[in-house]
Image (cartoon, rainbow, N blue to C red):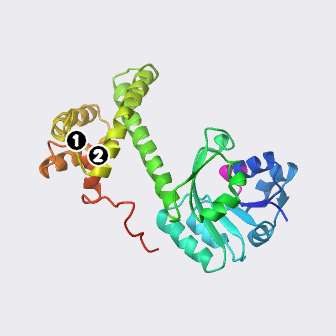
Amino acid sequence: MSDVAVLGLGAMGSALAGALLDGGHTVTVWNRTGHRAAALAERGAEVATTAAGALRAAPVAVVCLTDDAAVRETLVAVPGRTLVNLTNSTPEQDRGLADWAARRQMTYLAGGIMAVPSMIGTPAAFVFYSGDAGALQRHRALLERFGGVEYTGADPGRAAVHDLALLTAMYGMFGGFLHAAALISAEGIPVAGVEPLIRGWLTAMTGALPAMASAIDSGDHTATGSTVRMQALAYPNLLDAGRERGLDNGLVQPMGELLTRAVSSGHGDADLSVLATMLHGGRVRRENEQQIDP
């Protein structure tokens, strides 16, 4: 029997399997299209011809497939096995799969990978995990082959929440940069020359995040600097400049609309952090509140 099975050998799954092999683990791999396993087989991996065969070949199976539908189509019941699902998922999908596994006497760990394939196995990579804490501890040495281990709690949906939150912040940053780049290039200015200034500005602005996070948690959005009203007054210039250059403002328009709505709702004198509460109707779910029933 192998130490671990890996189901799914796309770029990420192959990187995960490779890291396990590099760590000296015996690995069984499976992929829907078998040719993807060839390179790993040359490195010593056993190749299963079916997903069921891979699941039976090891006490723990790492699953990294395209999406939740592919996971549900692939998995079969093998009682006693531990599933580590590193497929990009929503909290609800992971809670549903955890229930599916429990009803089949299988243990479930959800994971969210914070890395691109080339980062797997390096200090820059880390993975959020949630679900069965005992399984995490039993297999921690194996999971550390991928990168840092960040356990987010027993609720199987917590890893996905953290994963998607970080990705949301990342895409927001990329969206802002891309609009800024379009604005600069519309003036005939090389973006590469301005990029260091943008990067430095964004880095400086991250200094505001700890105070904003505390304000969101406490509900105290007292402004100590620029208010929502001040920013709402200035924001149209950003949109007008894009419009006048024929740009699509789709990446930045929603923020302007939210600022305007915040002022109209009586939050003009508040800190920008108040916008987070507006996104979900003004209610923040606390750590000690009852978990959502999957």
List the residue tagged with mark 2. 215
- On-image quarter of the N terminus: bottom right
The front one of 176 and 141 is 141
What secondary structure is marked by label 2? helix
Q: Position of residue 201 (x, y in %)?
A: 37, 26
| Residue at the image position 39 percent from the left and 60 percent from the top | 287
Q: Is residue 274 magenta?
A: no
Q: Position of residue 209 (x, y in %)?
A: 36, 39
| Residue at the image position 41 percent from the left and 35 percent from the top | 178
The front one of 187 and 48 is 48
The front one of 124 and 219 is 219
> What amino acid is found at the position of numbered circle 2 in the picture?
Ala
Asked if residue 162 lies left or right of residue 287, the reply is right
Specify whether residue 81 is in view. yes
Q: Crowding at label 2, few (<14), some or many (≥20) Cα neighbours within 10 Å?
A: some
Comparing marks 2 and 1, which lies closer to the viewer? 2
Q: Are marks 2 and 1 in contact (CB under 8 Å)?
A: yes
List the residue tagged with mark 1. 271
Write the start and end of the magenta stretch as one range: 9-14
| Residue at the image position 25 percent from the left and 51 percent from the top | 219
> What amino acid is found at the position of numbered circle 1 in the picture?
Asp
